[in-house]
Image: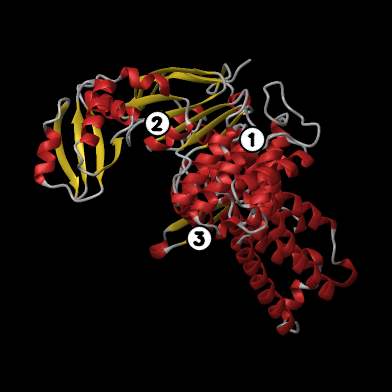
Amino acid sequence: MASALPLNPTRSASGALGHVPGTWEQAFLLSRYQFRDYLRSRRFILMMIIVAAIAAILSFVLAYYHSSAAVQALTSSSDAFYGTFWAGGVTVVIIFAGIIFGGDAIAGEFQNRTGYFLMGLPIRRTTVYAGKFLAATAASLVAVLAYLLVLLVNGAVYLGSGFLPASLFESFAIALLYLLALMGAVFLFSSMFKNSLYAVLVVAVLFLFGFTIIEDLIVGLVKIEPWFIITYAQQVISYPFLASLPAHMTTVTSRGPRGATITTTSYAPTYLEGLVIMAGYFVLTAAAGLFFFEREEFT
Amino acid sequence: MSPSIESVDLTKRFGTFAAVDHLNLKVNGAKCVGFLGPNGAGKTTTLKMFTDLLFPNEGEAFINGVSVQKDRKLALSVCGDLIETPEIYPSLTPLEALEMSGSLRGMRPEEIRSRSSIVLEEVKMSEWATQKVGRFSKGMKQRVNIAASLLSDPEVVILDEPSTGLDPRGMAEVRNIVRGLKKENRLIFMSSHILSEVVDVCDEVALIDHGKLLFYDTLANVEGRLTRSATSVEVSFSRPVSDEALAQAASIPGVSAISRSGPQRARVMISGGADGQAQVLERLAAAHLGLMSFEPSQSALEELYLQEISRGD
């Protein structure tokens, strides 16, 4: 086989071509190719269809019911508008994006056997994990930005010159932290299972309704603050749009049947608490996912 | 430093089953070594530990003296490998897959372009270079995988049954590629259960069964390892062989047994080594039975393989 190169080859001391880049450089390189793969995939089209569907419904409702009092109230200020449509919708977009782009990110390497191609290269597992994490987060960010763009267009129509408030930037930053936290959790489940379907199912069930049910049960039955539930923390995405933050703990006493007194306590995370929970989820779940991936074998 | 791979007490257990059992093997120098064994012998498991896809329970694997288990990045930097049939991200083209592989190895863009063109030409995939891999057949993907393993012109090439999934023409082409890979300062370690493939392209052979190394030797020395009582020879005639003709052949001194293997073919067991074979051939030719060809029915490697494997059973 002709192996000589018509140029000055960069042979390493060991003899093969190339000097293997550092861990982070490799991670960024890998994320670039993985991101390209996402952009060309059917899943990306699916995600864009979901965003487009949300955008179409939103735009239709705003246009059709524009004269109603409820819509008038929502479009009376940027905080009301974005507090409802951005803070209320972006978490759904992030959850869908996390499931679609991250659900099989690691499990798929085993199930689809792409890992045999990748792991035969001189690359650490940590690098592969980081590269795939970056790519899945970037692809999800594209979906979030698409959703934001739809809102900004609608905002420009209904809010006029005040369609870009500072509070939106603040909320966007928190949403990014939530995206990282969710992606960390998604990668954890994806690393735990070698089957993409299991990983996607667990993530979908937990984030779409599982965590919310658990949160309600904890508050209702155990009567403690559910500070360890990620969906509890996601409320802080709406805080930049509120004139005053909600009380951390609210206790309501009411009369039940036969004159019994019923005391109901509800919780809302403090600003800092919400951010810490998200950051904690990101760090702990991403690290735990890496722990599992480092130990998973290609049998 | 000459390229080398080494396993030291390499052991992999799945539950109580030892797929690889304290394997000690050192291969050193520029050569092609066939890693032979029946299905389930532990070949792929061994190669997966050499590429860090599986983690050994005991022992270590070294490439050019670097422990794969301690520093996979450094160890694999000199190595091109192909384990089983990897899948490439389906939306990538062969050129993009090679670009990804090359850039992760730290090759310069112009090196990647130049080498990609060479290796894709070598595996006869140049005309598909810009088509998406997702549309390829298994054989085409395997060719791209082979190209990727050769991209960095590595010193050590580890191939796990590289002709898997290929049609007969593809298998022959892979053999040609592997033969062409042999060059100064390159070690090729190739697992296979196709004996003719190993005989065709390899210089040395390591036989493994039940996770243990049975022998490691040059192909030239394999003949000497055989403990033969008789050699099996396939004989073909220009006309159908009658029972009388078979009886006549059986009476030739040195023929210990004879059986019909086709209308115009017979299998003859000959004792007496090479001299015995020569005498029997002369007498068969002189008997005017219409002798057309006379060839060993098994290669020395095949005989030794069966001998060693059956001893293990």
- Residue A254 numbered tag: 3
Numbered disc 1: secondary structure: helix
Q: Nearer the viewer, residue B209 or A119?
A: B209
At horizontal 60% and vertical 54% (from top left) the residue drawn is A101
The reply to whether discs 1 and 3 touch (Cβ–Cβ < 8 Å) is: no
Identified by mark 1, the residue type is Thr
Any mark on residue A127, and which? 1
Q: Position of residue B188 (x, y in %)?
A: 53, 29
Q: Which residue is mark 2?
A: B43
> How many numbered circles does the render carry?
3
Q: Nearer the viewer, residue B267 or B172?
A: B267
Callout 3: SS:
strand
Give residue A150's position: percent from left, percent from top: 75, 69
Compute the Cα span from label 2 to label 1.
Answer: 28 Å
The C terminus of chain A: image quadrant? top left
Give how far across and how far down residue B215 sits, in percent: 36, 19
Parent chain of label 3: A
Chain containing mark 2 = B
Chain letter behind tag 1:
A
